[in-house]
């Protein structure tokens, strides 16, 4: 069974995964790289679609107990029995808009990804499927080292779940239009 780090683009998955993998002596399996190498990305107007059924089959043969799997598709291509702990990194959607601007995402892609974080779509799907193995960790306003310490605590104790409700924050700020089109 593997450790998994997932979450929306821009939350810090790869930065944190490399450090956690080094700390625990794990090999990193990047789901996006596996999909790209297998030619599973299909470009559409504003996104890349992936054949998740085919990706599941490919990943099944690559996963070992000494793996750290990273990617936003993790909840959709892994099964509960393949996962020891799933960390769902969460980041303030206002911060994500700045990350996406720096990455030169277009407006549609920025809103789609930030809106997904506001609604907690990946978190919801991961928690629903992986239940007691899924832990949310907020990366906003924390140093990389603080996030690593939180994740290390979760891995060693199965404790440290953080509640997240960005929708409440965005609603209180009357900013739904910033993240969602009419």
Image: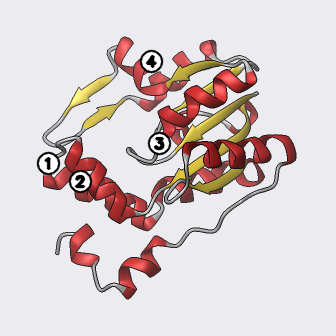
Do the CB atoms of the residues marked 2 and 1 lie less than 8 Å apart?
yes
Identify the residue position indicated by label 3 in the image: 12
Q: Residue at x 29, y 86 (%)?
A: 174
At which x and y percent is residue 132? 77, 53
Mark 1 or mark 4, earlier in chain: 4
Colour scheme of the rendered structure = secondary structure
Q: Which mark is residue 106?
A: 1
Alpha-carbon distance for marks 3 and 2?
Answer: 16 Å
Alpha-carbon distance for marks 1 and 3?
Answer: 20 Å
Do the CB atoms of the residues marked 4 and 3 lie less than 8 Å apart?
no
- Nearest the eye: 85 or 127: 85
At which x and y percent is residue 14? 48, 32
| Dot 4: element | helix
Alpha-carbon distance for marks 2 and 4?
Answer: 24 Å
Identify the residue position indicated by label 4 in the image: 34
Alpha-carbon distance for marks 2 and 1?
Answer: 6 Å
| Dot 1: element | loop
Q: Residue at x 71, y 59 (%)?
A: 161
Q: Which mark is residue 110?
A: 2
């Amino acid at each position: 069974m593997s450790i998994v780090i997932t979450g929306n683009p821009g939350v810090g998955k790869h930065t944190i995964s490399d450090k956690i993998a080094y700390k625990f002596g794990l090999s990193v399996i990047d789901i996006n790289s596996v999909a790209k190498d297998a030619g599973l990305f299909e470009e559409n107007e504003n996104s890349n679609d992936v054949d998740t059924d085919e990706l599941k089959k490919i990943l099944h043969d690559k996963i070992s107990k000494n793996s750290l799997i990273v990617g936003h598709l993790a909840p959709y291509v892994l099964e509960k029995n393949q996962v020891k702990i799933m960390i769902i990194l969460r980041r303030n959607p206002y911060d994500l808009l700045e990350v996406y601007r720096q990455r030169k995402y277009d407006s549609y892609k920025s809103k789609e990804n930030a809106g997904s974080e506001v609604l907690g779509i990946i978190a919801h799907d991961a928690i629903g499927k992986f239940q007691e193995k899924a832990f949310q960790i907020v990366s906003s306003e924390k140093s990389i080292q603080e996030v690593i310490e939180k994740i290390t605590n979760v891995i060693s104790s199965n404790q440290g779940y953080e509640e997240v409700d960005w929708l409440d924050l965005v609603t209180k700020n009357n900013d739904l239009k910033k993240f969602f089109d009419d």
